[in-house]
Amino acid sequence: MKQKGSSKKSRDIWRGRLGTGLDETALTFISGMEEDRRLVEYDIRVNQAHVLMLKKKGIVDKKSADRIVKSLERARAEHKRGLLLPKYPRFVDVHPIIEQFVIDDLGVDVGGKIHIAKSRNDQVMADIRLYMRDEFLKLNEQLLSLISTMLSLAGKHRETVMPGYTHTQHAQVTSFAHYLLSHVDVLLNDVARIKGCYSRMNLSPLGACAFAGTSVPIDRHYTAKLLGFDGIVENATTAVSSRDVLQEAACVIALLMSGLSRIASDIILWSTFEFGMVELSDEMSDTSSAMPQKKNPDPMEAIRGKANEAISSCANVLSLVRGLVIGYHKDFQEMKRPLWKSMDDARFSVAVMTKALKTLIVKKQRMLELVLKNNVTAMDLAEYLAMNTSLSFREAHFLVGLLVRETMNRGKGLSAITSDQLTSLAKKKLGKKVAVPQGTINRILDPIQSLRSRVSAGGPSPSEVARMIRARTRTIK
């Protein structure tokens, strides 16, 4: 690159108000260069759009504007070779580096026109919105892939009976497919939240300048169009001093990670020897350095840990803005680090969870064994009695509870209940005659029949699960 004049002289023009250069300690302390590396390409695009608008409005002549746009392309090429940022170690963020490059390349008389009618304040928010927009699109694509994997897995396990839990205790019969769908619906909410946040992210702050607009007759809608924004953040102060859309993004990511963490916790618990309901594939597990028998669910544990980080980052981003008076503040720089980290972790976590579920070993026989050993069809019997005998549901609930206690005291499960036992206990405790054939009792207490009978909307019956899978598959197409 040919330098068009004294680099030292051109850099002096940044500090006309100040008599000395920035102290080295202060420079290092306030520098945001590490976080800004992700924004270089976006900053170049923003500058180019701004210059093209200035040309269109006749604010910068065509020849100068064209030269600046080409110079920005040279800056892009320098950055791709890893040469741009190291040339300018005395700047605290990326925006003046790119302007300085153009000034060094074309001279201050031409390069110095690039910044009219904008500020770093509106420029940085334009960069961040463009970056977050792209990241959201990538995350959304990964989420849809995860949901597709879960729907495919659910389709294979509509009749894979397993115990459902409340209070971490066996509650009712469900299926592994129905379990998966419960998380699919939460992930679909995450997709909707990303879409909503994206729509608010996809508005241009460019042209708001420092915070109160500009006297230069610019066209903000034109730069918004060039950059692919849906419109502009109209109020200039809001455009540069509000970070609500970034706070929303942090919350969206925290909610997503919280949901992934719950899936991870289930897999961790259910893969223990005591549960033995699922097993992570070898490629999604680690082992112990000391205990040779270990198969550790490290990727799932890492997801839980990163979920905690995402929640902390969300709190960080929310609290950072809470006490600031209106206007732009350097404090905003501190939002990038936790936001970038959260987005990186979210995308990585979704990818890991997708691979884990694609290769997950589902132990159908163990799931059925656990169902048969416990009393998860008790509610089925209570519902039958309430619907087909003289008992109210509360009486039926009481009677079945007594039956459970009696059979457990004998070291047995509900499958040991007899018709005579039920009739005798109803007469003794409720003073009512209740007769249910043994064959009917056996059918009601059968886990597969229990599963098939739960046909209420959203229930785990195979037919209802199949309907929900089809509906959700259409949603993600």
Image: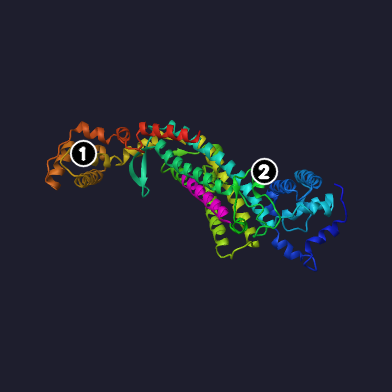
Marked residue nearer the N-terminal end (2 or 1): 2
Q: In which quarter of the view is residue 179 placed? A: top left
Q: In which quarter of the view is residue 272 placed? A: top left
Marks 2 and 1 sit apart, C-alpha to C-alpha, by: 66 Å
Please name the predominant secondary structure of the magenta segment in the image.
helix
Q: Residue drawn 78% across and 56% down?
A: 89
The type of colouring in the image is: rainbow
Q: Which residues are magenta?
A: 243-264
Q: Dot 2, crowdedness within 10 Å: few (<14), some or many (≥20)?
A: some
Q: Which mark is residue 87?
A: none
Badge 1 is on which residue? 387
Q: Position of residue 427 (x, y in %)?
A: 12, 44
- Of residues 94 and 44, the one nearer the viewer is 44
Q: Position of residue 26 (x, y in %)?
A: 73, 65
**Is 326 rendered above or below residue 392?**
below
- Of residues 340 and 101, the one nearer the viewer is 101
Q: Residue drawn 80% across and 69% down?
A: 19
Q: Amino acid at mark 1?
A: Met
Residue 344 visible in the current orientation: no
Decide if residue 167 is on the left or right side of residue 312: left
Return the residue found at the far bottom: 19
Badge 2 is on which residue? 226
- Of residues 106 and 339, the one nearer the viewer is 106
Q: Position of residue 58 (x, y in %)?
A: 75, 48
Q: Is residue 57 magenta?
A: no
- SS at circle 2: helix
Q: Amino acid at mark 2?
A: Leu
Q: Residue drawn 70% across and 62% down?
A: 30
Q: Residue drawn 63% across and 55% down?
A: 337
